[in-house]
Amino acid sequence: LGGTLPPAAHVALAAALLQSLATRIIGDVLALRDIGVEESEELPQILHALVDDAPSAAVGRTAEHAPALTQAVRDATPALLQLQVLLEVLSARLADIREWWSTGALQARGFGAEQTAHLIRALFEHTELRSAVLAEIEQ
């Protein structure tokens, strides 16, 4: 596509495709009611390549101005950042998620209270700590 479309159109098309894909993946993961240990380990392993490599692959490694175009695709694809955060949450300890929430790091990267609470419920067994963290998030 890079040789066929003007750079701006190429970036717009690549960003739209990646935005749609990342949004779909996020929705599918957030639809899970229970995320087991295996899934919480395997999903990040599988999906990190998408987050890390898809923008440059969409631009084409041989494209003129590839680094700038790759960054433009990343900038136009906010769902990739949200997917990256989701993958970090899947791999995190409950204490880490609690800290990220209390410092505003999750909110700044597109994760709201409902999404964060849902992931905590899906990832962690019911304990007093989980209840306390959920109470902090849902207040």
Image (tube, grey):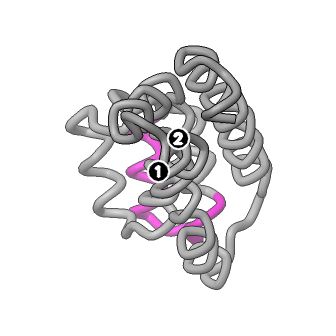
73 vs 18, left or right, is left
Asked if the residues shown at circle 1 and circle 2 are in contact, with their CB atoms under 8 angstroms apart, the answer is yes
Task: Say what amino acid the circle numbered 1 marks.
Answer: Gln
* Label 2: element kind: helix
Q: How crowded is mark 1: few (under 14 residues within 10 Å), some or many (20 or more)?
A: many
Judge whether residue 112 can be spotted in this image.
no
Relative vertical location of residue 42 with respect to residue 118 in this rendering, above or below: below
Q: How crowded is mark 2: few (under 14 residues within 10 Å), some or many (20 or more)?
A: many
Label placed on residue 80: 2
66 vs 95, left or right, is right
Q: Which residue is drawn at 39% across and 51% down?
A: 132
Task: Identify residue for label 1.
Answer: 84
60 vs 84, left or right, is right
Asked if the stretch drawn in magenta spans residue 129, the answer is yes
Say which of 82 and 36 sits in front.
82
* Label 1: element kind: helix
Say which of 74 and 45 sits in front.
74
Residue 125: x and y in percent read: 58, 71
Asked if the stretch drawn in magenta spans residue 116, the answer is no
Say which of 38 and 17 sits in front.
17
Judge whether residue 137 can be spotted in this image.
yes
Quadrant of the frame with the C terminus: top left
Relative vertical location of residue 31 with respect to residue 38 in this rendering, above or below: above
Distance of label 1 from label 2 (alpha carbons): 6 Å
Numbered-mark total: 2
Residues rendered magenta in the picture: 122-139
